Image (tube, rainbow, N blue to C red):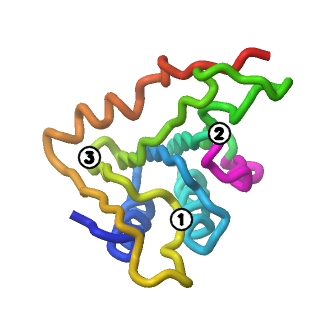
């Protein structure tokens, strides 16, 4: 059990650095802050080592700063904003407000992190840490988590144009 980002991010960054085959990361919030930049850099380095990096970020909560890295790594990097915030015309049915709230990471199909921690720094100007946690998982439980991470988002609904 990892009860704050201060416990979670060092383990996540070590796991990304140790990845050999694949990384699946899903997040609702992915901020362009010190934590977001550290995670992005670790993912870019993993992709540069030949690790397949799959990044799924909610189209509303995710940061637009997350883009495929430069030449040589783009083939291993897939950034998929999940759902748009609204249609091009501004009008939107209730389905447009469906969000991807999963916070999920799977490393090499052997280690998973699940919970409520987004890729965002702890607030510096608020007393105490965010009240989120994550669980690091190993063993047989990682197999169904991997299947969930690798499946297409079949229930995603696009906004009408």
Magenta-tinted stretch = 59-73
Residue 85 x, y percent position in the rendering: 69, 35
Residue at the far left: name it: 140
Q: Does the magenta stretch include residue 64?
A: yes
Q: Residue at x 19, y 50 (%)?
A: 138
Q: Mark 2 points at which residue?
A: 59
For marks 2 and 3, give the CA distance. 28 Å
The crowding category of the residue bearing disc 2, from other C-alpha atoms within 10 Å (few below 14, some 14 to 19, many at least 20), is: some
12 or 101: nearer the eye?
101
The crowding category of the residue bearing disc 3, from other C-alpha atoms within 10 Å (few below 14, some 14 to 19, many at least 20), is: some
**Circle 2 or circle 3, nearest the eye:** 2
Residue 9 x, y percent position in the rendering: 41, 69
Going from the N terminus, do you reach mark 2 or mark 3 first?
A: 2
Taking the image as shown, residue 59 lies to the left or right of residue 154, namely right
Going from the N terminus, do you reach mark 2 or mark 1 first?
A: 2
Q: The residue tagged with tag 3: helix, strand or loop?
A: loop
Q: Mark 3 points at which residue?
A: 110
Going from the N terminus, do you reach mark 3 or mark 1 first?
A: 3
Residue 155 x, y percent position in the rendering: 48, 19
Q: In which quarter of the image is residue 151?
A: top left
For marks 3 and 1, give the CA distance. 24 Å
In the rendered view, tell whether residue 17 sits above or below residue 74: below
Q: Mark 1 points at which residue?
A: 120
In the rendered view, tell whether residue 34 sits above or below residue 41: below
Residue 130's tag is: none
For marks 2 and 1, give the CA distance. 16 Å
Q: Residue at x 31, y 49 (%)?
A: 114
Q: The residue tagged with tag 1: helix, strand or loop?
A: loop
């Amino acid at each position: 059990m990892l009860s704050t980002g201060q416990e979670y991010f060092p383990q996540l960054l070590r796991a990304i650095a140790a990845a050999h085959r694949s990384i699946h990361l899903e997040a609702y919030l992915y901020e362009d802050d010190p934590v977001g930049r550290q995670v992005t850099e670790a993912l870019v380095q993993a992709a540069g080592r030949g690790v397949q990096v799959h990044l799924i970020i909610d189209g509303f909560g995710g940061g637009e700063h997350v883009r495929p890295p430069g030449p040589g790594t783009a083939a291993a990097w897939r950034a998929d904003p999940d759902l748009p915030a609204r249609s091009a015309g501004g009008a939107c049915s209730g389905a447009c407000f469906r969000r991807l709230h999963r916070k999920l990471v799977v490393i090499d199909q052997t280690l998973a992190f699940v919970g409520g921690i987004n890729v965002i720094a702890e607030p510096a100007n608020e007393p105490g840490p965010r009240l989120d946690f994550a669980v690091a998982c190993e063993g047989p439980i990682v197999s169904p988590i991997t299947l969930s991470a690798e499946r297409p988002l079949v229930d995603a609904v696009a906004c009408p144009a």
